Image (cartoon, grey):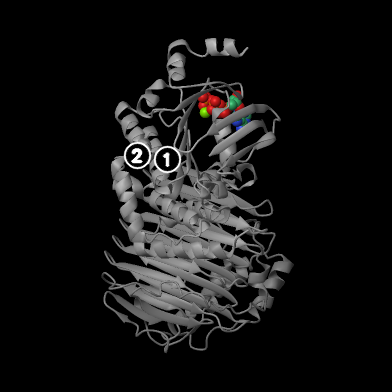
Amino acid sequence: MGLPQAKQNATEARLARLSMPPETGWTKLPREAALARVRAMGLPGSRDEYWRFSDPSSLIAPEAPRAALFEVKDEAPVFDAMDRLRIVFVDGVFDAEASDELALAGVEIDRLGGAAGQDIHWAREVYGTLEARGHEPVDRPLAALNTAFATDGVLIRVTGKAEKPVNIIYLHRSETSDAHLHHCIKVEAGAEMTLLENGPAAARFNKLMEVDIADGGTFHHIRTQGRDHERRAATHIFARLGKESTFKSFTMTANGRMTRNECIIELTGDNAVAHVAGACVGDGDFVHDDTVFITHDAVDCESRQVFKKVLRNGATGIFQGKILVQPGAQKTDGYQISQSLLLDGDSQFLAKPELEIYADDVACSHGSTSGAIDETALFYLRSRGVPRSEATDLLVLSFLAEAIEEIEDEGIREEIVGRMAGWLSRHRG
Amino acid sequence: MLEIKNLHVKLEEEGKPILKGVNLTVEAGKVHAIMGPNGSGKSTMSYVLSGRDGYEVTEGSATLLGEDLLEMEPEERAAIGLFLAFQYPVEIPGVGNMTFLRTAVNAQRKARGLEEMDAATFLKEIRARAKELKIDAEMLKRPVNVGFSGGEKKRNEILQMAMLEPKLCILDETDSGLDVDAMKLVSDGVNALRSPDRGFLVITHYQRLLDHIKPDVVHIMYDGRIIKTGGPELALEVEKNGYADIRAEDA
Ligand SMILES: Nc1ncnc2c1ncn2[C@@H]1O[C@H](COP(=O)(O)OP(=O)(O)OP(=O)(O)O)[C@@H](O)[C@H]1O
Ligand SMILES: [Mg+2]
């Protein structure tokens, strides 16, 4: 079955601008397999059902659309005050100078870019593997494109309790940079780590993370997508969870002309727990898409999806979230909520929540709402002397709270609330 | 202190008139009580005074300390010293009670040209006031009114009032839903705030509250007007005979 001509042309036009790194080493085979997947699926088009709400054209255009550099003058980068191991990429290129030494008790860290010649056997089993599993039943061609052409990324094997969080910091110094980064994380049985990500990665970036968590492992992920308003971003997280393991990922997004965050999770061992949450705020020319697919394929697992979007001045928020409960995945506890707060009549929230259940003893619930600021609550706050703008900010934070509360670490939670408050105070009225 | 003259108010959407010529003056240092049957317009009056949307003033005026209330935003009214303890306090998930109160206190101080209260002083103040009202530290940390019992919500209103130190306090059925002990706590809280430069407008259905908070003047509101004004004995009369006699007199 061939692809429609237009799709094939668009795909080849994009591929013509990309080349695999010269030293592919052990990644050669998975890259070639991924390239074959891209050609078979074709890159996404606006007529694809899975891209019905978000136009992928800026993500697949041969050239990255120009994105003005963003200079944050008035505040320190997020997570700056934390004790963490820093790994810095500038426009997708590793910056050894700005990074800490890649050594930390409890983890082994390598780079994809530097690992080409080495045989990092654990990474062989992960690189492209979870991505390749993630196309059923929906194609994710941008993920396959990433596996084929990623220039760098970090490879982290967690063997114990990581001594401190690892922070991948992205910097953007070129208006036309176009980056593919691919991270692999293997959490061994009973091991535990926290990964932080922040900063604008490039004018356009395609970022992918594969997280393989063995029995009893724990992985926390907190990421912020910041104030680089003109970025175009496609990100994927593929996670596979073993028995009694925990995966928690939270994303804060502010601004961004086009951000599509996909998260694909497979619960393959009994009693595993997966939480994904997102809090986003958008003003004006803003499209933010959270697309989540959680597969329950074991007994007694829990999954939670909590997504909140605050939209104003014509901003668009999208949520596509699915819980798939496979036959035999009894005692599944699945929860999904996606909500938007529309601060004016111009903004819109498009949501497609889905449940597909093939087991009979499960408890799954989902809900999706769109609403305005609660006038009664606003009056209550104002009657106590809080000016309208500040009262509105408080109610926005109140709306976002359920998502932010998914972050376990209190310090990080407060940091995120502070960042949100800062953003709100700069985007009033 | 508070002067309401010939106040006529209708609902913006339905155009239905609710207040039909209210006249009322509350002097500094005095406690005025308002009683009246359900639906007579007591809460509407308190909302209109504090600036809630959805009402249209078609006639009359309301001033506090000589300033025209009706022209002001709700937060401005609060800043000049108006406080309404809500009949139904609002739940605000995700905003801590303490954060909320601190924001409110400092917003009012700012509006009055005062410096912000520093965190330590604020904490000391709120702990002391909360203790008097038997509000525990845990409740201060919880989101505003979320999961509070009816009585806890009412006590929380009084805590806010105590922290904000308003000039004119309107209490809309603060006694409803309170058990006997809580009624005493709340009344003590209110009485502690009585002072020569502060006025109170206490809306209630029951004499019981007025046993604790002794009013100087009692008004009866009926169908959007004050139809009778008297001393504390008026409340006793209502308690005994209901509103029928008073209505008959008015007619
Ligand atoms: N937003 C509204 N929409 C429709 N009707 C309203 C609205 N607000 C007030 N009313 C009506 O106005 C009248 C007065 O209501 P209000 O709440 O002021 O009475 P009240 O004296 O406080 O009564 P209660 O003792 O029961 O608290 C009632 O008939 C009520 O139904
Ligand atoms: Mg009422």
The kind of residue on which mark 1 rests is: Pro
Tell me how many marks there are. Answer: 2
Chain holding disc 1: B
Lateral position of residue A341 relative to residue B186, left or right: right
Q: Are marks 2 and 1 in contact (CB under 8 Å)?
A: no
Residue B35 in percent (x, y) is at: 50, 23
Residue that badge 2 annotates:
B192
Residue A320 found in image quarter: bottom right
Q: Quadrant of ligand 1?
A: top right
Q: Mark 2 packing: few (<14 Cα in 10 Å), some, or many (20+)?
A: few
Q: Nearer the viewer, residue A295 or A292?
A: A292
Residue A395 sits above or below residue A231 on the image? above
The Cα atoms of the two marked residues, 2 and 1, are separated by 12 Å
Q: Which residue corresponds to the image point at 56% horizontal and 74% vertical from the top-left?
A: A205
Tag of residue B196:
1
Q: Which residue corresponds to the image point at 70% horizontal and 72% vertical from the top-left?
A: A10
Residue A49 in percent (x, y) is at: 64, 56
